[in-house]
Image: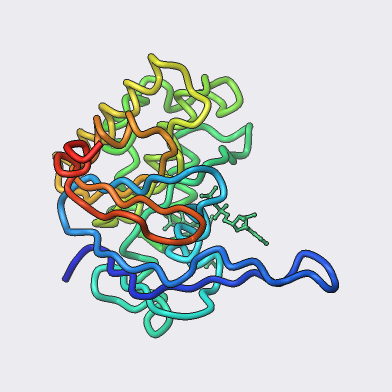
Amino acid sequence: PPAIRIDNLVKEYAPPGPGEPPKLALKGVSFDVPQGGIFGLLGPNGAGKSTLINILAGLVNKTGGSAEIWGFDIGENPRNAKRSIGIVPQEIVFDPFFTPFEVLENQAGFYGIPRSERRSEELLRAVHLWDKKDAYARTLSGGMKRRLLIAKAMVHSPPILVLDEPTAGVDVELRRQLWELVTELNGQGVTVVLTTHYLEEAEQLCDRIAIINHGELIADKPTRELVGMA
Ligand code: ADP
Ligand code: ADP
């Protein structure tokens, strides 16, 4: 199966106030994310990107249509669907007094992964944080925190990693670091999906790009075809 299959996905949020119309954030979006690549979901603010990611993460209920992750329907088989992806949220949320090692061990605990099967060291090395394993999270730089979030999302070894605006508001140097890390993980076989509102980021990093605007899909193509059109 494709890594992710989105079919006619609809999300309607309740009206913001009495007498106001409901907000249609996704108006029947369909696309497949093939296995093995880096897939970019590109669109301006308010396009519906986070809504789509939150539906995949099981944090928001869809109104209509379907979404499958690794062949598991998120409505019919939410447990397996959720286990097949790691989500890197936009906001950084850690207990400031936990160390990177503890953050990963706690996450493994949430997933019921036995100690002998945990990969905290391997993951911290993969995101270049092994030398910071015992530092309090509050003392880490913004870039280190973002890398720790990526390691946290990989704790249960999901075949798919989804990053919501991984480089929004970061400087050029850190953006390059994060791109490198994403490319490394992809090289190890992880299918990557990321949302962005930077065309340049999608072009540099992604082999396929879907563009959404106002809750509608307006393109879904290999990057080289899309760039050829511009
Ligand atoms: P993006 O991530 O592309 O910026 P979002 O998915 O956050 O877009 O938002 C899509 C639309 O849905 C926007 O118009 C936004 O205001 C609306 N929206 C998002 N979350 C909610 C919510 N919880 N309740 C009501 N409307 C929402
Ligand atoms: P619950 O459904 O009871 O929240 P989970 O095992 O799904 O339990 O989640 C446990 C912890 O893992 C929470 O901190 C949650 O935010 C986080 N989490 C859940 N799913 C993912 C995921 N796919 N990627 C990263 N973190 C996740």
Q: How many numbered marks appear?
A: 0
Instruction: Report the colour scheme.
Output: rainbow
The image quadrant of residue 207 is: top left
- Relative placement, left or right, of 202 versus 141 is left
Residue at horizontal 83 percent and vertical 73 percent from the top:
19
- Quadrant of the frame with the C terminus: top left
> In terms of image quadrants, where is residue 165?
top left
Residue lying farthest front? 229
State the residue at coordinates (22%, 51%). 191
Rendered position, 23 above or below 153: below
Residue at the (18%, 59%) spot, across then down: 34
Q: For this rendering, which residue is in front, 34 or 216?
A: 216
Residue 53 against residue 209 in the figure, above or below: below
Residue placed farthest to the top in the image? 173
Residue 131 versus residue 185 in the image, above or below = above
Q: Quadrant of the N terminus?
A: bottom left
In depth, the one of 111 and 143 nearer the eye is 143
> Percent from the top left, x then y, of residue 202?
30, 37
**Residue visible at 50% across and 66% down?**
26
Q: x, y percentage for residue 16?
A: 77, 64
Residue 59 in the image: state x and y as whole percent: 54, 65
Query: Residue extending furthest right?
Result: 18
Q: Residue 166 vs residue 85: left or right?
A: right
94 in relation to 34, above or below: above
Residue 127 percent coordinates (x, y): 32, 30
Q: Quadrant of residue 76?
A: bottom left
**Residue situated in front as seen by the camera: 10 or 71:** 10
